[in-house]
């Protein structure tokens, strides 16, 4: 969708949307539009008892005495409570009312006492429209034209055109990262195997973003027996991708982001039930987030030093596949008894975590993974699970998630859980038993974190894919994590 910003004037034709604050009072430009419709909009607002509540809309179609095809009032809420997030949600609500129009103008009069300036508000509304407009329809061949959205261009009329453009330039880079993540998560597994994913990642190189791809032979030389063990049952070779963005100073800290990239997870020999197995195309969600985040940081020229590492594999049953009972050796020399081949994501992350520490010595690490069904049982689709060895890092991530409505809930860790993954024949086992599965998985990962390194693990199994519409996305891939981590970087390290 193309987004433009223009001076505040009354549109004479086409589709128009008007931002309305709590109380239902139209601004000066909004009042002019209402007069042009013969008062049809204000009459509709009154009939619908519309008071400018945040995210609510009222529409008038083809109002008399005008060349307007549609007029929509969208609630912004109380001026002093308007945030970038609520303005985005208002923009997203507008998309549903405007999606059948080829072009629309959104009018945002200056609001006295607003919590954010009108330029940032305009950028946020535009961002919400763009995020909500996402559709993954590249494989739809029979959809009727009438069923498809038509909105291609949105012009946002604002008193602060310069400020809006500057704010949206940053937001656009972030949204591009979200879109990339959503695309990766949405792709079918026969298209997005580890090699194809690595090729997409490699295509992001440029403009200061470095991308390196490790082959199976290179990983074998590095001793990555944990990751390679997961991949050995698939005809599709594994890859490891390393992103490097050096936007900060030489003495600035290095932030590391690590993602699980299981492009399809059948469970391996510990085969998953057939029902719902199709969902496992998005078991690479953590890798998708890291890829989208690195694109966003590079796109907005973030003043930070960041490294992203993603381990890309496919977990399949085969005569060569890893067996329950096998013992593998990770890149840092620790041995792992594989009790269940469906607990494979932690094996992939083990070698990726070692690699990023050994080669970049980061000042902190955040890993993301669609790791456990246990976290979905605990938190459903409303929160991602947060596990950390550092209170400050955990608090920073939680605050960033809250500010963009990608919420985290901190879960417990401790020696009483860690002992559950001790193995009688190896250093550890990859399964902790029936209870506290999300925590024992996190305890496993912590064993690969060097002492003194702040680390957080985000279990995003419940939030990577939505089975129903959300405020900023329709059913499908959410892109959860890109905006959260971008805010974390911006608020704490820039």
Image (cartoon, helix red, strand yellow):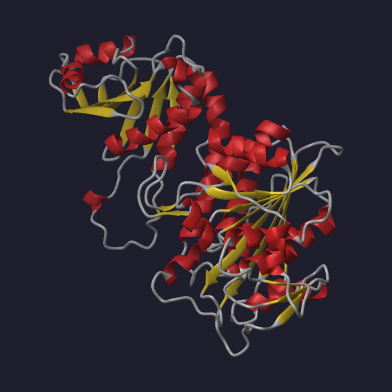
The x, y position of residue 423, in whole percent, is 73, 75
The outermost residue toward the left is 64
| Depicted 448 relative to depicted 180: above or below | below
Most foreground residue, 406 or 255 = 406
Viewport quadrant of the C terminus = top right
The outermost residue toward the front is 416
Q: Please name the residue shown 20% across and 11% down the image.
A: 35
The x, y position of residue 453, in whole percent, is 80, 49
Q: Please name the residue shown 39% across and 59% down the image.
A: 138
The x, y position of residue 397, in whole percent, is 64, 40
Q: Please name the residue shown 27% across and 35% down the image.
A: 97
The outermost residue toward the bottom is 319
Most foreground residue, 259 or 105 = 259
| Depicted 296 relative to depicted 243: above or below | above
Q: 61 left or right of 199?
A: left
The picture quadrant where one finds residue 321 is bottom right
The x, y position of residue 166, in whole percent, is 57, 25
């Amino acid at each position: 969708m193309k987004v433009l910003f223009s001076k505040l004037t009354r549109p004479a034709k086409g589709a128009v949307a008007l931002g309305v604050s709590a109380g239902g009072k139209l601004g000066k430009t909004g009042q002019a539009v209402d007069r042009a419709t013969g008062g049809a909009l204000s009459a509709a607002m009154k009939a619908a008892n519309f008071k400018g509540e945040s995210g609510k809309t009222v529409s008038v179609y083809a109002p008399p005495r005008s060349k307007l095809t549609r007029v929509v009032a969208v609630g912004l809420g109380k001026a002093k409570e308007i945030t970038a997030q609520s303005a985005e949600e208002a923009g997203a609500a507008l998309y549903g009312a405007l999606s059948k129009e080829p072009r629309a103008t959104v009018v945002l009069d200056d609001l006295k006492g607003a919590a954010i300036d009108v330029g940032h508000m305009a950028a946020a509304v535009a961002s919400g429209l763009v995020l909500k407009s996402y559709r993954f329809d590249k494989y739809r061949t029979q959809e009727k034209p009438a069923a498809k959205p038509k909105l291609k261009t949105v012009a946002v009329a604002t008193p602060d055109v310069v400020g809006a453009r500057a704010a949206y330039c940053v937001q656009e880079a972030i949204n591009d990262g979200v879109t990339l993540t959503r695309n990766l998560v949405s792709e079918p597994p026969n298209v997005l195997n580890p090699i194809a994913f690595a090729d997409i990642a490699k295509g992001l190189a440029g403009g200061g973003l470095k991308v390196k791809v490790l082959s199976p032979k290179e990983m074998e030389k590095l001793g990555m027996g944990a990751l390679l063990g997961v991949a050995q049952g698939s005809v599709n070779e594994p890859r490891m991708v390393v992103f490097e963005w050096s936007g900060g100073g030489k003495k600035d800290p290095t932030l590391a982001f690590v993602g699980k990239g299981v492009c399809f997870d059948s469970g391996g020999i510990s085969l998953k039930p057939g029902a719902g197995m199709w969902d496992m195309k998005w078991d690479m969600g953590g890798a998708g987030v890291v890829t989208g985040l690195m694109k966003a940081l590079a796109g907005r020229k973030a003043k930070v030093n960041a490294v992203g590492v993603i381990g890309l594999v496919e977990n399949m049953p085969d005569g060569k596949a890893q067996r329950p009972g096998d013992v593998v050796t990770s890149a840092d020399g620790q041995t792992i008894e594989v009790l269940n081949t469906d607990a494979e994501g932690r094996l992939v992350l083990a070698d990726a975590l070692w690699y990023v520490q050994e080669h970049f010595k980061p000042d902190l690490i955040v890993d993301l993974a669609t790791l456990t069904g246990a976290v979905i049982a605990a938190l459903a689709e409303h929160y991602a699970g947060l596990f950390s060895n550092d209170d400050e890092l955990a608090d920073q991530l939680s605050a960033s998630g809250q500010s963009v409505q990608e919420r985290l809930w901190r879960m417990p860790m401790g020696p009483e859980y860690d002992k559950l993954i001790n193995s009688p024949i190896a250093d550890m086992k990859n399964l902790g038993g029936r209870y506290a599965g999300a925590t024992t998985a996190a305890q496993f990962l912590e064993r690969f974190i060097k002492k003194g390194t702040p680390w957080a693990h985000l279990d995003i199994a419940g939030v990577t894919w939505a089975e129903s519409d959300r405020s900023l996305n329709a059913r499908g891939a959410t892109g959860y994590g890109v905006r959260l981590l971008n805010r974390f970087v911006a608020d704490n390290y820039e």
